Image (cartoon, rainbow, N blue to C red):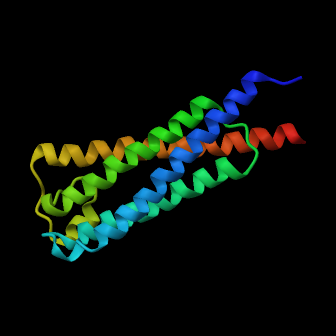
């Protein structure tokens, strides 16, 4: 018997996977373009960190999407929502690092800031960098945990 709800969940998962894939590819492209600007910022070491964030997180999202789109899984629609949200929050985090290559905050990335000679930003700048990193970081951790659980559930059901 055809299960309408299962079909709807699969289609939502497919659309979510495609959205995550597009975000990942766009992050990679943004990172490549940002790489051209890196040497022209006041804090190029921090700008390089932003470049790496774009590239690495873009590739992680591409991998997440590839897993969702290519392999059978039991990742539910709420988990897909968390994964989509993590993609969007990653943009905010990466752009806060772009801004930080002009601000020179020290709170969230103290090692890179020290290497860059950053002197610290205004309180609102420090808070902006911190909030975007905490939000995106926690959401990405949750998204990957949910992805693993969805694949583990599938493996358990398939015997």
Instruction: Determine whether, in the image, residue 129 is placed left or right of residue 83.
Output: left
Going by the image, does 14 lie left or right of 28? right
30 up-or-down from 138: above or below: below
Provide residue 134's location: percent of width, then percent of height. Answer: 35, 44
Which residue extends farthest bottom?
39
Above or below, 124 relative to 76: below
For the point 15% across and 61% down, which residue is it? 104
Q: Is residue 16 above or below residue 32?
A: above
Q: Quadrant of the C terminus?
A: top right
Q: Position of residue 50 (x, y in %)?
A: 31, 63
User: What residue do we see at 55% from left, 57% from top?
Assistant: 62
Determine the residue positioned at 45% across, 38% down.
Answer: 85
Q: What residue lies at 48% left-to-right and 55% top-to-bottom?
A: 24
Q: Nearer the viewer, residue 115 or 18?
A: 18
From the viewer's side, name the closer residue of 57 and 131. 57
- In the rendered view of the protein, which quadrant contains the N terminus? top right
């Amino acid at each position: 018997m055809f299960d309408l709800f299962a079909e709807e969940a699969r289609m939502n998962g497919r659309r979510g996977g495609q959205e995550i894939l597009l975000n990942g590819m766009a992050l990679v492209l943004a990172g490549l373009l940002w790489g051209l600007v890196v040497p022209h910022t006041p804090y190029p070491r921090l700008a390089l960190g932003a470049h790496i964030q774009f590239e690495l997180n873009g590739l992680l999202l591409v991998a997440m999407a590839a897993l969702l789109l290519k392999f059978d899984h039991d990742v539910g629609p709420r988990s897909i929502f968390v994964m989509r949200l993590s993609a969007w929050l990653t943009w905010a985090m990466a752009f806060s690092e772009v801004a930080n290559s002009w601000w020179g905050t020290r709170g969230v990335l103290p090692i890179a800031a020290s290497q860059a000679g950053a002197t610290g930003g205004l309180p609102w700048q420090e808070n902006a960098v911190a909030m975007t990193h905490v939000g995106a970081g926690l959401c990405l951790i949750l998204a990957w945990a949910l992805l693993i659980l969805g694949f583990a559930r599938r493996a358990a059901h398939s015997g």
